[in-house]
Image: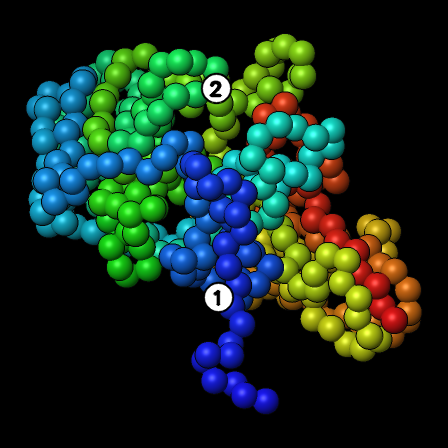
Amino acid sequence: MDQSPLNKVRPYLITKKLVPENQETPIHFQKCDNVYENLFYRRNHFPYPKFTSSFYFLPIEGLVYTPRVFSLQEIYSFPAKTINLVLECSGNKRELFEPKVFGEQWGKGAMSQGIWKGVSLRSLMKYTELLDIAKEIVFEGYDYGERSDSNQLHHFSRSLPIEKALDPDTILAYEYNHHPIPFKHGFPLRLIVPGWYAMASVKWIKKIIVIDHEFKGPFQAVDYVYYPNKENDHRKAPVNSIHINSTIQSPLNMQVLNTGVYEINGIAWTGSGQITTVEISIDEGKTWKTCELASSTEKYAWVRWKYKWDALKKGEYTIKSKATDSLGNIQPLKPIWNRKGYGYNAIDCIKVKIE
């Protein structure tokens, strides 16, 4: 068989919407821990922004002692921090919710992982210093447009509480996988908030504003909020930390296989703590076996796991995976339903047939 590069079959992004562009990573075929830019999922609320990056400056204003405007060259000159982490859309796996919810029907690939390099926001804020009354820091992106619930133009803007914003691992990134961040992923500067769903990691940062109150922008007060009730807003809560989760990468759902020995494998991740155990069930959850974990010292990265399966008996099988982390979080049998479809993290489940 001809194994030349011209005959190599490669995966592609899975298109969900073209305008704005929303495409997911073919996660079942992602065998490397760092996702190449061309396969990194794309989540946008508006068309791509238009600005001249060669004249880019970043203002920090609001409740600071010394407002500053930083050039890219200045930011590049500060001590850099590098973090390998998962970025996961809070709507990842939304299509699995029952009852169904409206919104982008993401499968299991609205997530990717890679190496981000930039300057710690904490380090940058030392040059401006915060007033004592500062409560939150707002990050406004260059991307803007109309929302379905408003005729006004809105920039994509999000805030972080001071404590999270000044976490040493919260960075303003300018590189991805040792190259400048691709434009579609936030060039020239993107906020990276480890452990939180990716809506917090604002792209194409236009300005940073320090405020003394709770930010009420629509992407904070309306979207990216858990609404557990369909008819009202009772018990609503903000979306922030990534839920513990796992995904079976192979075999594929509804795949037909011959009898034989197979490796079931996948990934597991969590927003806080670290993955300590992944269990697999071949009998619809009646019994569970412990998987082998790949060693990982990366605080915010996913963990690969595998299990050897002797599939010697013909029939249909339901395979499930369940992760546990160091803080005692365990994937639930069912997700917490919410009407916008955020944070799906139920035990992963596929079916296969052995012939």
> In what quadrant of the picture does the N terminus appear?
bottom right
Give the answer, above or below, for where 292 lies relative to 22.
below
Direction from residue 41 to residue 143 in the image, left or right: left
Please name the amino acid that badge 1 sits on: Cys
- Give how far across and how far down residue 185 sits, in percent: 34, 46
Residue sitting at the far right: 314
> In what quadrant of the picture does the C terminus appear?
bottom right
Give the answer, above or below, for where 207 lies relative to 24.
above
Closest to the observer: 316 or 329? 316
Residue displayed at 46% across by 41% down: 18
Direction from residue 60 to residue 275 in the image, left or right: right
- Give how far across and how far down residue 230 sits, in percent: 67, 16
- How many numbered discs? 2
Give the secondary structure at mark 1: loop
- Give how far across and how far down residue 77 sits, in percent: 10, 50
**Quadrant of res 129:** top left
Residue displayed at 37% across by 17% down: 217
**Quadrant of res 180:** bottom left
Q: Is residue 297 visible?
A: no
Closest to the observer: 185 or 133? 185
Q: Which residue is mark 2?
A: 148
Direction from residue 57 to residue 90 in the image, left or right: right
Decide which of tag 2 and tag 1 comes sooner along the chain: 1
Give the answer, above or below, for where 300 lies relative to 228.
below
Tell which tag, 2 or 1, sits nearer the viewer.
Answer: 2
Q: What colouring does the structure picture have? A: rainbow
Q: Which residue is mark 1?
A: 32
